[in-house]
Image (tube, rainbow, N blue to C red):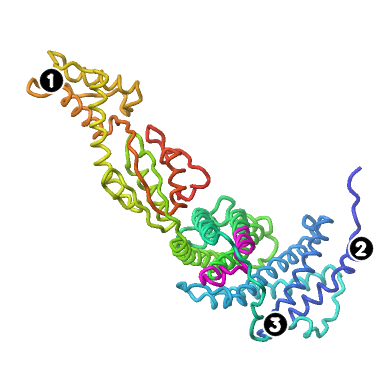
């Protein structure tokens, strides 16, 4: 037995009985459109609440897939979404002074006002079309009452005094460091998900695999929400928050990014569902409520642009905070076993240090290097390679791999035999297969051990082989940075013994950008 079909007359009666407050709010919206300050949070709250209830009721009866009711349902969904967007933008607009935002290139307050005007225009258009659609469906439209007192929002200046007792936290340094580090890691993750630079507003941006799809924005939004909760749980109303002026500034940046991501998520949702080329193919018989280009422009130029700018400013703030609360430590770790600090290990260590903004030094022997500079680390290879050659000669002597004289034996054969023996013992790794060695007779006036080590050094210099080493380096600096360096070392500095890229643990994913 199939599902029971409700008659149109019964369904009209049901919707009519549930839409009176909805139509009064929509009608009030249309009647006050000429008033510059007509849109208020009480009105948006009523529109959002009523549209949410009506949409759920329509969906429970399958209105989305019904020719007669799909348009009414679509307009209701638009009113719900743009009421929510407008509410978010209102929140941002009213909170800007409290956020204590650091300066960015564009006028954020003015851009927020422009974005709010855009959302208002969509709400007005949707309200007009909804009333027209309701009349087609023979739904009774109630008289719009004068509800100025209900929907108006008169806000006196000032804020309540902060006189709540402050909490004490024992490990101030640990708490601030945890929060700052969490923000830096999330900011790095956001850059991986979102466009890195000014991006043209085009439809491919919001495809399922695009850089600013609803799915990606929703995931980032959740993570920033969790970060804000972390702050409110461990830092809000503490003495530390009072004494460190940077903490409330960081809280403001976390919050504004969160609300911008929520706004972006709704814009992306509407584009993907209702305004994209794919959606328009499905809805080709309906007139557009929103122009896709205008929607994408607001999404990119306002939401994504300011998310990026505020993340950048707050990153610098976090790095300064970490420096103030730095706990200095020292670790001793092995250098990359075969190729030393070549491009990949040097770059990863440098990116790790720069990510935190702390000073970290690496000591190797008597030399000290700046760990934030790949070129500095790369310079350490001179010392590493010299150590390799010395240890190689000692290993050859200890294992008695060559006789004191070469006789008539080809030097190439001696070198090959030594390399194979050392490779079997894990002392040398061979990259070139088959290994080509220059044919050369031993020089009677030079020590054979020196000739062999020289030939092996040439093969190493040309990248055909590499010599293993157990030399250790000492890193000194911020303990948080050192913890990540230790983790990087445990994972082979991001590569295997053959120099191939390997995946890093989740804590170090920011290094793969």
The residue beneath circle 3 is 38
Is disc 3 in contact with disc 2, using a CB cutoff of under 8 Å? no
The answer to whether residue 276 shows anywhere in this view is no
Residue 451: numbered disc: none
Q: Residue visible at 12% across and 13% down?
A: 408
* Residue 123: percent from left, percent from top: 69, 73
* Residue 109: percent from left, percent from top: 55, 77
Circle 2 crowding by C-alpha within 10 Å: few under 14, some 14–19, many from 20: few
70 in relation to 411, above or below = below
The residue beneath circle 1 is 442
Is disc 2 in contact with disc 1, using a CB cutoff of under 8 Å? no
Is 70 on the left or on the right of 453, as rendered? right
308 in relation to 513, above or below = below
- Which quarter of the picture shows residue 28? bottom right
Q: Main secondary structure of the magenta part?
A: helix
Query: Viewer-proximal residue, 142 or 504?
Result: 504
Is 507 on the left or on the right of 153, as rendered? left
In front: label 1 or label 3: 1
Circle 3 crowding by C-alpha within 10 Å: few under 14, some 14–19, many from 20: some
Q: Distance between the residues labelled 2 and 1?
A: 105 Å
231 in relation to 362, above or below = below
* Residue 343: percent from left, percent from top: 33, 44
The answer to whether residue 303 shows anywhere in this view is yes
Circle 2: element type: helix
The residue beneath circle 2 is 9
Circle 1: element type: loop
Q: Distance between the residues labelled 3 and 2?
A: 36 Å
Q: Distance between the residues labelled 1 and 3?
A: 95 Å
In front: label 3 or label 2: 3
């Amino acid at each position: 037995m199939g599902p029971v079909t409700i008659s149109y007359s019964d369904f009209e009666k049901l919707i009519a009985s549930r839409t009176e407050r909805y139509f009064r709010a929509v009608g009030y919206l249309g009647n006050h459109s000429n008033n510059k300050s007509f849109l208020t949070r009480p009105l948006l709250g009523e529109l959002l609440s009523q549209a949410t209830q009506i949409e759920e009721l329509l969906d429970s009866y399958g209105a989305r897939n019904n020719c007669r009711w799909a348009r009414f349902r679509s307009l209701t969904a638009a009113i719900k979404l743009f009421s929510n967007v407008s509410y978010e933008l209102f929140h941002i607009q009213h909170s800007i002074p409290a956020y204590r935002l650091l300066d960015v290139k564009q006028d954020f307050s003015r851009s927020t006002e422009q974005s709010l005007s855009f959302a208002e225009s969509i709400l007005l258009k949707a309200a007009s079309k909804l009333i027209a659609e309701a009349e087609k469906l023979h739904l009774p439209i109630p008289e719009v009452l004068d509800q100025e007192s209900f929907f108006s929002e008169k806000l006196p200046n000032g804020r309540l005094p902060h006189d709540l007792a402050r909490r004490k936290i024992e490990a101030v340094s640990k708490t601030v460091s945890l929060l700052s580090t969490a923000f830096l890691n999330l900011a790095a993750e956001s850059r991986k998900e979102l466009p890195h630079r000014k991006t043209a507003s085009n439809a491919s941006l919001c495809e399922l695999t695009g850089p600013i799809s609803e799915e990606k924005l929703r995931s980032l939004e959740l993570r920033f929400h969790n970060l804000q909760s972390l702050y409110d749980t461990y830092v809000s109303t503490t003495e530390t928050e009072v004494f460190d002026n940077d903490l409330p500034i960081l809280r403001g940046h976390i919050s504004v990014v969160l609300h911008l991501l929520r706004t972006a998520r709704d814009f992306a949702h509407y584009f993907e569902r209702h305004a994209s080329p794919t959606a328009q193919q499905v809805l080709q018989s309906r007139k557009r409520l929103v122009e896709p280009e205008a929607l994408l422009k607001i999404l990119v130029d306002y939401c994504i642009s300011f998310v990026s700018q505020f993340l950048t400013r707050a990153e610098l703030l976090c790095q300064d905070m970490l420096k103030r609360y730095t706990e200095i430590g020292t670790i001793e770790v092995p250098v990359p076993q075969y190729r030393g600090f070549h491009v990949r290990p040097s770059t990863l260590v440098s990116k790790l240090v720069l990510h935190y903004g702390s000073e970290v030094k690496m000591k190797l022997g008597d030399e000290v290097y700046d760990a934030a500079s790949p070129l500095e680390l790369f310079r350490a290879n001179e010392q590493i390679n010299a150590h390799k050659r010395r240890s190689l000669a000692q290993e050859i002597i200890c294992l008695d791999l060559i006789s004191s004289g070469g006789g008539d034996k080809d030097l190439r054969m001696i070198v090959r035999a030594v390399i194979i023996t050392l490779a079997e013992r894990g002392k040398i790794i061979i990259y070139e297969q088959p290994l080509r060695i220059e044919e050369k007779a031993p020089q009677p006036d030079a020590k054979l051990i020196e000739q062999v080590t020289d030939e092996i050094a040439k093969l190493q210099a040309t990248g055909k082989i590499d010599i293993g080493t157990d030399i250790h380096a000492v890193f000194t600096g911020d303990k948080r940075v050192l913890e990540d360096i230790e983790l990087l070392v445990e994972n082979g500095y991001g590569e295997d013994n053959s120099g191939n890229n390997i995946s890093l643990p989740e804590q170090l994913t920011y290094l793969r950008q």
